[in-house]
Amino acid sequence: MFEFSFLWAFALLPAPLIVWWLLPPHRDRVESIRVPFFERVSTSVGASPSRGGAVIPRTWLQKIVAPLIWILLVTAMAGPRVVEPPIEKIESARDLLLAVDLSGSMSTRDMVDPDGESMPRLDAVKQVLDEFVARREGDRIGVVVFGNQALLQAPFTQDHDLVRAMLGQTRVRMAGSQTMLGDAIGLAINVFENSEAEDRVLVLLTDGNDSGSKVPPIQAAEIAADHELTVHTIAMGDPASTGEAEMDTETLEAVAAATGGRAFRADDREELEDIYRRIDELTPIDVTTTSYNPTRPLTHWLLGASILLALAYHLVMSIAWAARNSRGQHA
């Protein structure tokens, strides 16, 4: 799209005509020699002197070039520019962190895939999370994995293909065989430390109970609440499990309640998929879009054209003047 920044500049177009109408002609006074016998000289040559002045005639080229240069200068003053198509920038209003348990019990094959075949818990989680991340267009998403220790698998990013790839690379026991829930929440708090998003959410999934974190899960949740972090917890697996694989649903419910989140429980893959869809509803996609139109100014092109036109005019006139003098000398 083409536009002018200062349309009022075109009001200056008739200025030369107004000046020509209102101001008197320019008079150039020059020194002269008084000749006492001027009348006798003029009579002898048959001339009759009269009062007057020499008016320099304007050439047809000057009548064309001068108005054209003025039009170019006024158009340049108007600030012509080309407005490019808008460029949109999508900024997430939410940072979403996924915490995934990689303890030894996540290798238990008690989940069923869509074809009816048994599969490990972690594989079911990765399938569901892959679909979940794909739906979260616009969110910044990060991944934390935990076992004996909590590790940052993927920092916050809007490159969801990267997040899905990093989730696909997770393996059971790659962070140890235990379940440090409190440490996972503590790491999440640190990950959110530099987040400027208004809405900050942690989705914590585990199939066991805390194995002895440095900071107990409930205490870590209270610290998360002080940092305005919402934690949704998901307990999955066999509720009849014992030992480290025993699900501590009470602790997970307390963690969620302390931060204003929700606690869920999934006994199979379908329930797990349904939970993440419910989380979609609890945390709807929220993005802010800003756009701006880049512009390309054309003023310099018009100024350059006016300068070149003036130079060309003077060059032509110089050549014409030199040609006339050459003919006069030969005559």
Image (tube, rainbow, N blue to C red):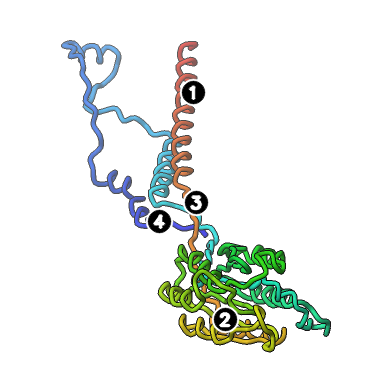
Q: Position of residue 75 (x, y in %)?
A: 42, 49
Quick check: marks 2 and 1 in contact, CB under 8 Å? no
- Which residue appears at 46% of the width and 69% of the height? 197
Question: Which residue has dot 2 on it?
Answer: 233
Indicate which label's residue lies in the foreground, 4 or 1. Answer: 4
Q: CA distance from mark 3 to mark 2?
A: 52 Å
Label 4 crowd (10 A; few <14 / some 14-19 / many >=20): few
Mark 2 and mark 4 lie on one chain; the one further toward the N terminus is 4
- Which residue appears at 48% of the width and 15% of the height? 326
Mark 4 and mark 1 lie on one chain; the one further toward the N terminus is 4
The amino acid type found where label 3 is placed reads Arg
The image's mark for residue 296 is 3
Quick check: marks 2 and 4 in contact, CB under 8 Å? no
Label 1 crowd (10 A; few <14 / some 14-19 / many >=20): few
Instruction: Tell me: residue 13, above or below residue 51.
Output: below
Q: CA distance from mark 2 to mark 1?
A: 89 Å
The amino acid type found where label 4 is placed reads Ser
Q: CA distance from mark 3 to mark 1?
A: 38 Å
Mark 4 and mark 3 lie on one chain; the one further toward the N terminus is 4
Quick check: marks 3 and 1 in contact, CB under 8 Å? no
Instruction: Name the side, left or right, on which 74 lies relative to 260.
Output: left
Q: Position of residue 164 (x, y in %)?
A: 68, 67
Indicate which label's residue lies in the foreground, 2 or 4. Answer: 2
Instruction: Name the side, left or right, on which 161 lies relative to 254.
Output: right
Question: Which residue has dot 4 on it?
Answer: 5
Q: Position of residue 91 (x, y in %)?
A: 51, 67
Indicate which label's residue lies in the foreground, 4 or 3. Answer: 3
